[in-house]
Each structure stands twice: as C-alpha cells, then as structure tokens.
C-alpha cells in the first residue's frame, strides 16, 4: 500500500515478510487495511492496558489539547503534571512521593540510574556499581542498554560504570522451583559481596523482554533485604508490570516491598500518548538540593511531562480503578494460564508460565514460535514472538468471552504447527507452576 520509507525499530525482530498495517482500534480489537479485525493479544505496544479507543482517554486528551497542549516544566508548571504526580504519590507506598516525568521507559531508566549514582555523590560517599539481571531489559538508550546482558542488546562499547549481571541458575521454567529460587537469591547475595557496596540494584518484577520469566515469589523481598544490609538503592522497573499488568497494581506488590526508586511507562498512559515517570523518595530528591553542592538535577526532555500525556494518565488511573482492571488482569490471566496448560504436553513446548495478563508459551525453537504467531494471525489473533516464546499480553479490559476466544485460537494455532503425541489433547496440568505456591 505504501512505499517503504520507514525504518522500523528493532528491525531484526520486525518481519517485513508478513506486513500488517493497522488503521483502527476499538476495545480489545484492531483492524487492518483489508478490513480484518484481530483480537489484540499484544495490547498495542504492550501498553494499551485500557484497550483501544477508550472514550474517557480520548476525551481527556482532547480537553487538555484544547486548553494547553504543553509547556516547558523547567519554566512553569501545569495542572495536568501536578495532578498526575500527586496521584502517583498517593498510589505508591512509603516515601515515594517525588516524580520526574519523561517520555518513555528508556528515559525513565536513564534518569533513574543517573539519579541513583548522583545521589551517592551528593551525599559525599560515591558509589557506581549496579547489580541487575543478565536477562533483564530496561530500554534502548545507551545507558539502559548497558544494563542488559541479553545478546541482541549488547553494543560492545566500553562500560560506562561497573554492572554485575546476575544470570538465572537454570531455565526459565526451573526458575519457579524452590531449588532455583534459593540459588538465585544466593547469586544476588554473591553479587552484592563481589565488590564495593553497590550504588543500586535495578530489577524488573517479571523479566519481560528476557522471555516473560516469572520470578520466584519472595525474591524481590530478599533483594530488598540485601539493599537494606548494604545501604543500596532498590530501583524497580515497573515500565512493563506497572498499573495492573501482573494482576497487582505494581509488580513489587506481590512481594510487599517498597523500592527507593520506581520507573514507569507503558500502562501509565495506556499507550495513548508517550509518557514515562521516575518516582523517588523525598530524601533522594533532597540530596540534589542540599547546600553547598547545589548540583541539581541536570536531566530533562523538551516534551517530558507533556500536558496531554499527563492528563491521559490521570484518566487512566480513573479507568483502572472504576473498571476494576487490576482484578480483571488477575482473573483473566489465571483462566488463560489454565486454558493454555495442555500445551505443556506438546513435544515442542518447553514451558507455559504467567502472572496476571502476561502469559508466555516457551517453545523449543524461534521458528516454532514464529509459525504459531503467524498461524494465530491467520485466525484473527495477534500475539507476540519473543525469541522462542509466544507471549500473550492483551489489554487488561479483556472480557471472559475474549479470554476463551484467545485461548481457543492460540491452541488451534499450536495444533496446526505441532500437535501433542498421539494427537490427543491431554488433561490440563498446572501451568505456570513447578513448585510455585502462587
Ligand atoms: C521492563 C522494561 N523497561 C524499560 C523498557 C523500555 O521502555 P521504552 O520502550 O518505552 O523505552 C521496556 C520496554 O519494553 C521494558 O519492558
């Protein structure tokens, strides 16, 4: 339809062989140029938590656009930014009450790491070591990429600061066993002890790009305890998990921990307008204002805290609350996990795992995952390929009927690509659980 003048992001992943041009979104469905409607199992860009075309969000954007599209937050303030930062302070636990608004998850990571490292300089006890997951992903700016140990994010450029990347002791599937949970916690303890006290630990509550890896319950609490022991700042990346994705408002709620810094994006504005946020404690912010250093925060973006995005974000919080989307994510996610459980008996399937509305079917080979994703699309369902994994990340507004349709369609796509031994669908087995009591 169009001449190709667009350089798509992540071009090794984006497939030009099977083009798809989308022109409309309504609720949990999107329509292509041919008039075909698809059930959206990718939630736009993993962010359309309130579904597409939500009238409340459209109205909030239009109203703000007509009043004041944006104004530089360096020189002034606007009610949209004041309101969302106030609401985040009320929503987040503990002293997490000071929010810097940015445009994306990567910028939130960039700002969070910078704030963490500069905090230690501000208090006169410089630290620069960062501990993180080798399979973590925190964005694609230089600093954010530098954290990740995933093969396709490595730049090969010199390290900006020392990063200790903790690898899982076994497979993503065995990560949920008691033995691996203990080994992983021990690896974090070793990482803390392996050099000068870390400035910060930067972790996702569930490893999204790493393959939808569900971490052992209690791990984040264990990392929080290590941070307390070493005086290290705990930075939790809620860019993907935040605002209900995992069936709790924030991923860290599963472990009941309070981070020192939280990064957010994606679901914060349901993807309607770009927005990211970094929330820190009063004490961390204060360190940037203390005399005689007066270092200040030397970081910001022209459109950071854009008024339209900020207004939409406040409307998102209303929708999430009024439509019970956090509980819906937990219920629909559990149903989906159960319905997809039989895939564990397929020889080409390695694992079925999930938490809330992040459900991942890991296959033996990226080619299998790719064939399943295309088969699902032919049946009117969009799901995401992540290496050898098929990931289902629908809007949190998914209904019961759509949950059933999604599961049936995906099972049919798997049946076409790889059938279970003997061609008999086995009885459901407990998916997403190995020793996992959750
Ligand atoms: C956990 C996590 N952090 C950070 C990012 C980067 O966000 P963005 O793509 O908005 O820069 C992502 C994106 O997928 C993510 O999943």
Image (cartoon, rainbow, N blue to C red):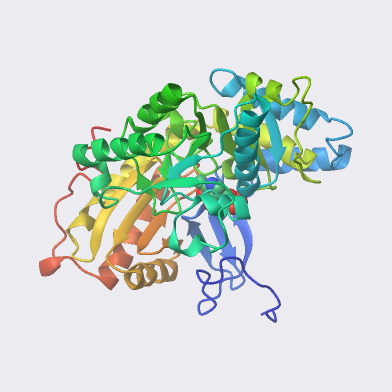
Q: Is residue 399 visible?
A: no
The residue at 79%/38% (across/down) is 307
Q: Which image quarter holds the N terminus?
A: bottom right
Measuring from the top left, give residue 407's x and y in whole percent: 34, 54
Q: Nearer the viewer, residue 427 or 234?
A: 234
Q: Residue at x 89, y 34 (%)?
A: 75
Residue 239 drawn at (x, y percent): 55, 42
In the displayed structure, 44 sits above or below 236; it is below
Asked whether the viewer can see residue 5, the reply is yes
Q: Is residue 302 left or right of residue 91?
A: right
- The total of numbered circles placed on residues is 0
Quarter of the image for residue 24 reads bottom right
**In the image: residue 24, left or right of residue 253:** right
| Horizontal side of residue 251 vs 66, given as left or right | left
The one of 271 and 257 positioned closer to us in this rendering: 257
Residue at the left extreme, as displayed: 422
Q: Is residue 91 left or right of residue 60?
A: left
Q: Residue at x 40, y 56 (%)?
A: 391
- On the image, which quarter does residue 224 sit in? top left
Q: Position of residue 335 (x, y in %)?
A: 32, 42
Residue 223 higher or lower than 172, as above or below: above
Please state the horizontal and vertical placement of residue 401, each as a whole percent of the image: 40, 47
**Front residue of this view, candidates 150 and 376:** 150
36 shown above or below 161: below
Screen quadrant of the C terminus: top left
């Amino acid at each position: 339809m169009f001449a190709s003048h667009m350089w798509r992001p992540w071009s090794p992943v984006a497939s030009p062989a099977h083009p798809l041009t989308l022109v409309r979104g309504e609720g949990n469905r999107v329509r292509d140029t041919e008039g075909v409607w698809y059930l959206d199992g990718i939630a736009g860009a993993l962010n359309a938590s309130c579904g597409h075309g939500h009238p409340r969000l459209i109205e909030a954007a239009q109203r703000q656009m007509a009043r004041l599209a944006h104004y530089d937050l360096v020189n002034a303030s606007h009610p949209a930014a004041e309101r969302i930062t106030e609401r985040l302070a009320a929503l987040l636990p503990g002293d997490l009450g000071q929010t810097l608004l940015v445009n994306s998850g990567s910028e939130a990571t960039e700002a969070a790491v910078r704030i963490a490292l500069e905090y230690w300089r501000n208090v006169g006890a410089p630290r620069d070591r960062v501990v993180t997951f080798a399979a973590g992903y925190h964005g694609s700016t230089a600093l954010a990429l530098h954290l990740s140990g995933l093969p396709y994010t490595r730049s090969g450029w010199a390290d900006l600061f020392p990063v200790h990347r903790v690898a899982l002791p076994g497979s993503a599937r065995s990560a949920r066993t008691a033995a691996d949970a203990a080994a992983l916690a021990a690896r974090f303890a070793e990482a803390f002890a392996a050099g000068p006290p870390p400035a910060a630990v930067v972790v996702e509550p569930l490893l999204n790009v790493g393959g939808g890896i569900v971490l052992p319950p209690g791990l984040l609490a264990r990392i929080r305890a290590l941070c307390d022991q070493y005086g290290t700042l705990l930075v939790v990346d809620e860019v993907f998990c935040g605002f209900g994705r995992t069936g709790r408002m924030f991923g860290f709620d599963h472990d009941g921990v309070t981070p020192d810094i939280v990064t957010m994006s994606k679901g914060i504005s349901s993807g309607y307008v770009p927005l990211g946020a970094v929330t820190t404690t009063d004490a961390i912010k204060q360190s940037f204002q203390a005399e005689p250093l007066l270092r200040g925060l030397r970081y910001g973006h022209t459109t950071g805290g854009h008024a339209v995005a900020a207004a939409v974000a406040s409307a998102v919080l209303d929708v999430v609350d009024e439509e019970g989307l956090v509980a819906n994510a937990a219920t629909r996610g559990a149903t989906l996990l159960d319905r997809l459980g039989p895939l564990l008996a397929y020889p080409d399937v390695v694992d079925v795992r999930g938490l809330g509305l992040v459900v991942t079917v890991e296959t033996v080979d990226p080619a299998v995952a790719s064939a399943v994703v295309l088969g699902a699309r032919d049946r009117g369902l969009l799901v995401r390929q992540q290496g050898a994994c098929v990931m289902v990340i629908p809007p949190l507004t998914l209904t019961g009927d759509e949950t059933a349709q999604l599961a049936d369609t995906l099972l049919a796509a798997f049946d076409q690509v790889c059938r279970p031994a003997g061609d008999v669908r086995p009885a459901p087995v407990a998916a997403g659980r190995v020793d996992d009591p959750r």
